[in-house]
Amino acid sequence: MNPWTGINYYRLKQVDLDGQFSYSTVVRVRFDKEPDATIWYDASGNQVKLSFSNMQPGGILAMYAANGQLIKQYNSKEQSQLYQFVLPDLAKGIYYAVWLSESIQLTRPILISR
């Protein structure tokens, strides 16, 4: 899906087995520019770092295991373009860093390979 930047309108069409159909209500969805953001793991400091340029600062970073279990959550109200979060000792594997702010949700995989 490649939506236009700005407001897009969507509705679903449900078709029954007998051929009858109905439409859902129209939903308005706003798509802003994809944030210029990078989330990476720094093994030397056992940290996850988040850097961005066109996102509203301040938010929550949550680290999840591949099975969806919440590992750690960090709240930040700082007005910064670079965030650094110290991680607990984690086993090797893939984790997911999720950044939530008032204006965006950003998810990136993180590989821990000590």
Image (spheres, grey):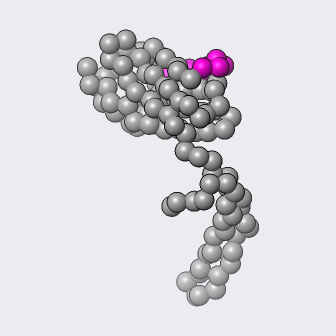
Residue 103 position in % (x across, y down)? 66, 38
Which image quadrant is residue 79 in?
top right
Residue at (64, 17) in percent of width and height: 78
In the rendered image, residue 23, in percent from the top left (x then y), is placed at 69, 74
Q: Quadrant of residue 17?
A: bottom right
Q: Is residue 43 left or right of residue 69?
A: left
Q: Which residues are magenta?
A: 72-80
| Image spot of residue 6 (x, y percent) | 67, 54
94 or 40, nearer to the observer: 40
Q: Is residue 64 visible?
A: no
Residue farthest top in this picture? 45
Q: Would you identify the image quadrant in which residue 81 lies? A: top right
The residue lying at 67 percent from left, 61 percent from top is: 8
Q: Is residue 95 magenta?
A: no
Count numbered badges in the picture.
Answer: 0
Q: Is residue 3 left or right of residue 90?
A: right
Note whether 36 is above or below 81 in the view shown.
Answer: below
